[in-house]
Image (cartoon, helix red, strand yellow):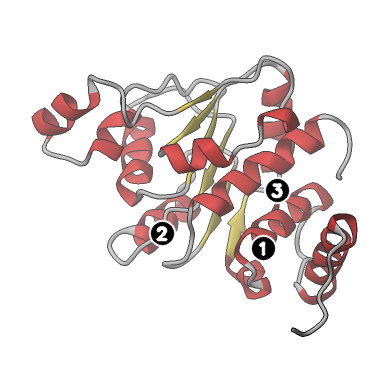
Amino acid sequence: MRPYERDPAAIYAASFATVRAEAALDRFPADVAEMVVRVIHACGMVEVADRIAYAPDVAASATAALRAGAPIYADCEMVASGITRRLLPDGAQVRCTLNDPRTPDMARDLGTTRSAAAVDLWDTEGAIVAIGNAPTALFRLLERLDDGAAKPAAILAFPVGFVGAAESKAELAARPRETPFLTLRGRRGGSAMASAAVNVLGILAAGGVQ
């Protein structure tokens, strides 16, 4: 067996040092760069930094919302489960309505996916939205904003896949509906990235970076 690092603190430090050394982070404000670092750490690909689209105030808006007690809406249970509660301010709520008993009937009536229908149960005003799975959830959120739904404090959009993922994120980046956002252009994404973006907000809201 080849030698390998066993010390958790050393692994942690070396991982983030590697990301910061290898990723192109110069174009990001410092707080947004921390979000990008965590997204990279979640996927192991420093090149995704080049595909990030964002609003400069996304981190500031989201951390202020967290401090004010705003809820976090996740499009799927995997995103919700990946959010580390101990990093969030006391009382912060993580909500996922995908498995709400109303969702299947709503999806059937609307002729859409459960992920999209679940968005109709969100109270988006001042909330943080984290999407790491379903492009239809992001499309539906944008539709709701077009229809006059209250704006979230931030949209963290990392839907993944071959049908609609790139397109939904391109729509968000092109027309963010006056809402701060962070997204990864193209097909790549995933729940781990979305959760990581939320987790660093908790650290920033507490006044530092671990």
Amino acid type indicated by mark 1: Ile
| Rendering coords of residue 99 (x, y %) | 31, 28
**Please, what is the three-letter code of the amino acid marked with disc 3?**
Pro
Residue designated by label 1: 40
Q: Are marks 1 and 3 in contact (CB under 8 Å)?
A: no
Tell me the distance, in whole angstroms, between the alpha carbons under discs 1 and 3.
18 Å
Report whether 165 appears left or right of 13.
left
Which residue corresponds to the image point at 37% horizontal and 59% vertical from the top-left?
Answer: 165
Residue 130 percent across, percent down from the top left? 51, 40
Q: Nearer the viewer, mark 1 or mark 3?
A: 1
Q: Quadrant of the C terminus?
A: top right
How far is mark 2 from mark 1, CA to CA? Answer: 15 Å
- Residue at x 71%, y 54% (from the top left corner): 38
Q: Residue furthest bottom?
A: 2
Q: Nearer the viewer, residue 82 or 61?
A: 82
Residue placed under numbered mark 3 in the picture? 56
How far, Cα to Cα, is label 3 from label 2? 23 Å
Question: Reading the chain from its start, which is encountered first: label 2 or label 1?
Answer: 1
Pointer 1 or 3: first along the chain: 1
Q: Residues within 10 Å of mark 3 (few under 14, many from 20)?
A: some
Q: Nearer the viewer, residue 98 or 186?
A: 98
Q: Earlier in the sequence, mark 3 or mark 2?
A: 3
Q: Which residue is mark 2?
A: 160
At horizontal 14% and vertical 25% (from top left) the residue drawn is 105
State the SS at label 1: helix
Using the rendered view, name the quadrant where residue 36 is placed. Answer: bottom right
Whether label 3 touches label 2, CB < 8 Å: no
Instruction: Judge whether 165 appears above or below 191 on screen.
Output: below
- Asked if residue 41 lies left or right of residue 187, the reply is right
